[in-house]
Amino acid sequence: GLTLTVAASGGGGGGGGSGDFTLSADPSSVTIVKVLGVYQPAKVQISVSCSGGFAGPVNLSSMVKDPQGLLTGDLTVQFDKTVLACGEAATMTIAPTGLQLLYSSYTVEVIGLAGSLERRTTVGVNVVGL
C-alpha cells in the first residue's frame, strides 16, 4: 500500500491567481554555421519576467520543430539551468544532434511551466553550410 500525500503550497493567495510571467529569448533567431565540417552551437539567453505578484519558480523545457512544424531530434537543446526564479535567465545551447542537418531552418519552442501557467517563446534557427 503506497500512500501519497500532496502538500498544497498556498503561497499567500497571490492576488487571486492574477500573477503571470513571460519568457523572452535573446536573440530570437540564431544561425548555426558549419566550420571545417563541424556545426558551431548557438547560445540563447532565456529570461523570465514576472508580474502581478507571481513568485515562480518556472520550469523550462523545449521542443524542436522542422520547417513542416513536426517534432524532430535533429537539434539538441540544453539549458544551463532548467528552473528559473523571477528575473533570472538561463543559457540555452542549440547544437546539431548528428553530423548532418536535413533542413536550413528549424524552430525551437521554449516552454515555461509554473503550476497551471504555461508560457512559450520561440527561437528561429537558421543553418548555414548544409
Image (spheres, rainbow, N blue to C red):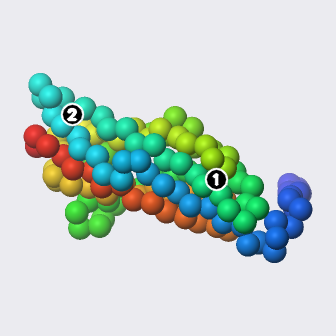
Gap in angstroms between the C-alphas marked 1 and 2: 31 Å
Query: Would residue 91 appear left or right of 59 to someone viewing this image?
Result: left
Query: Would residue 55 appear left or right of 7 to someone viewing this image?
Result: left
| Cβ–Cβ under 8 Å for marks 1 and 2 | no
Name the spot of residue 22 as percent of width and height, x first: 56, 61
Q: Nearer the viewer, residue 70 or 23?
A: 23
Q: Is residue 43 above or below residue 105?
A: above
Name the spot of residue 66 as percent of width and height, x first: 26, 59
Q: Is residue 66 above or below residue 78?
A: below
- Is any atom of residue 77 visible in this view? no
Q: What residue lies at 22% left-to-right and 63% top-to-bottom?
A: 67
Q: What residue lies at 71% left-to-right and 54% top-to-bottom?
A: 56
Looking at the rendered structure, the kind of residue marked 2 is Tyr
- Is any atom of residue 81 visible in this view? yes
Looking at the rendered structure, the kind of residue marked 1 is Val
Q: What residue lies at 16% left-to-right and 52% top-to-bottom?
A: 104
On residue 67, the disc is none
Q: Quadrant of the C terminus?
A: top left
User: Which residue carries the number 1 mark?
Assistant: 58
Query: Would residue 10 appear left or right of 50 to someone viewing this image?
Result: right
**Sequence-first tag of 1 and 2:** 2
Looking at the rendering, which quadrant does residue 113 occupy? Answer: bottom right
Q: Residues within 10 Å of mark 1 (few under 14, many from 20)?
A: many
Name the spot of residue 95 as percent of width and height, x first: 31, 38
Q: Residues within 10 Å of mark 2 (few under 14, many from 20)?
A: many
Q: Nearer the viewer, residue 98 or 43?
A: 43
* SS under mark 2: strand
Q: Quadrant of the N terminus?
A: bottom right
Name the spot of residue 20 as percent of width and height, x first: 66, 66
* SS under mark 1: strand
User: Which residue carries the number 2 mark?
Assistant: 39
